[in-house]
């Protein structure tokens, strides 16, 4: 078991909340104390990272999913001495492409009036999933419900967040790092995962088969199979104590 001052901080992705971790958090809590962070009212990567920092214990491992990976790296840039390790899931160091920016702008313009926000559309959620899960009504509604709980204000803020090119900066990260990607992720490619692995000194890469972008919900057991021994190894080596 980790020292009482060591924790694991989970940072969710775009329009997801703490229930993103519902299938993996109970197991992770057996290894070290877990904090499921949020972005607060932040509207930039920097302000979101500062909000997360305010929630973190004195010593911690960061786990960032998708947009949360950008925020996790910003946390490390700010307080590297407090970070014992970094897990980056389904994320990238690249800036948003022109097509991605257009898609986010169109989605923001199409959102319903305040008070009637219905969460992400069924079609956009289905497109992010593995083809075998694209008609999984329970999974899709689970993801939509997260967006509904966060609301339209959060949607507008998160849609407007700029993701800058981090590829020339990640070589300054020196904490133990695990990169996890999905073989069938249509939003973040394996090339992007390999850029993270190659850009961060000593980083390792694991690829999960039969999953789309939403790895924590699509393949939670495969994800735990990778994360659990990695965290235990950090503890054994004394890195996270």
Image (spheres, rainbow, N blue to C red):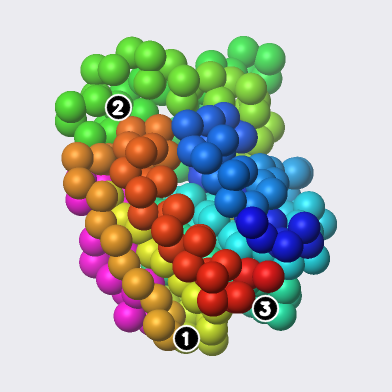
Considering only order in the chain, which callout, 1 or 2, is on the residue closer to the N terminus?
2
Can you tell which mark lies on residue 200?
Answer: none
Disc 2 marks which residue?
A: 126
- Counting from the top left corner in percent of width and height, residue 57 is at 78, 59
Residue sitting at 53 percent across and 19 percent down? 145
**Depth check: 123 or 234 in front?**
234
Q: Using the rendered image of the protein, determine whether residue 108 is visible from the camera's viewpoint.
A: no
Q: Earlier in the sequence, mark 2 or mark 3?
A: 3
- Residue 121 belongs to the span the image colors magenta: no
Q: Which quarter of the rendered picture does the N terminus lie within?
A: bottom right
Query: Helix or strand or loop: what does disc 3 sit on?
Result: helix
Discs 1/3, front: 3
* Left or right placement of residue 200 versus residue 117 in this view: left
Residue 80 is labelled as: 3
- Left/right placement of residue 201 relative to residue 222 reads right
Above or below, 109 against 27 in this view is above
Cα separation, mark 2 vs mark 3, equals 37 Å
114 or 205: which is nearer to us?
Answer: 205
- Relative placement, left or right, of 135 versus 29 is left
Comparing marks 2 and 1, which lies closer to the viewer? 1
Nearer-the-camera pick, 229 or 153: 229
Q: Position of residue 216 (x, y in %)?
A: 42, 39
Q: Is residue 6 above or below residue 76?
A: above
On screen, 123 above or below 109?
above
Q: Is residue 25 left or right of residue 139?
A: right
What is the distance, in whole Å, between disc 1 and disc 3 at their CAs? 13 Å
- Is disc 2 placed on a helix, strand or loop? helix
């Amino acid at each position: 078991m980790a020292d009482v001052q060591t924790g694991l901080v989970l940072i969710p992705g775009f329009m997801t909340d703490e229930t993103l971790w519902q299938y993996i958090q109970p197991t992770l809590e057996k290894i070290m104390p877990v904090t499921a962070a949020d972005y607060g009212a932040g509207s930039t990567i920097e302000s979101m990272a500062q909000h997360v920092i305010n929630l973190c214990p004195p010593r911690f491992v960061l786990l960032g999913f998708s947009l949360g990976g950008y925020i996790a790296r910003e946390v490390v840039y700010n307080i590297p001495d407090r970070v014992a390790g970094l897990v980056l899931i389904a994320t990238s160091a690249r800036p948003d492409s022109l097509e991605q920016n257009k898609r986010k702008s169109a989605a923001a313009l199409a959102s319903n009036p305040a008070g009637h926000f219905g969460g992400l559309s069924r079609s956009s959620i289905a497109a992010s999933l593995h083809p075998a899960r694209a008609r999984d009504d329970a999974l899709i509604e689970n993801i939509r419900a997260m967006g509904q709980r966060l609301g339209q204000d959060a949607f507008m803020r998160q849609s407007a967040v700029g993701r800058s090119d981090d590829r020339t900066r990640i070589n300054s990260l020196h904490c133990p790092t695990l990169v996890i990607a999905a073989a069938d992720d249509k939003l973040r490619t394996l090339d992007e995962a390999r850029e993270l692995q190659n850009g961060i000194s000593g980083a390792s890469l694991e690829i999960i088969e039969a999953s789309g972008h939403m790895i924590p919900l699509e393949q939670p057991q495969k994800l735990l199979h990778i994360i659990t021994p990695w965290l235990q190894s950090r503890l054994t080596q004394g890195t996270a104590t």
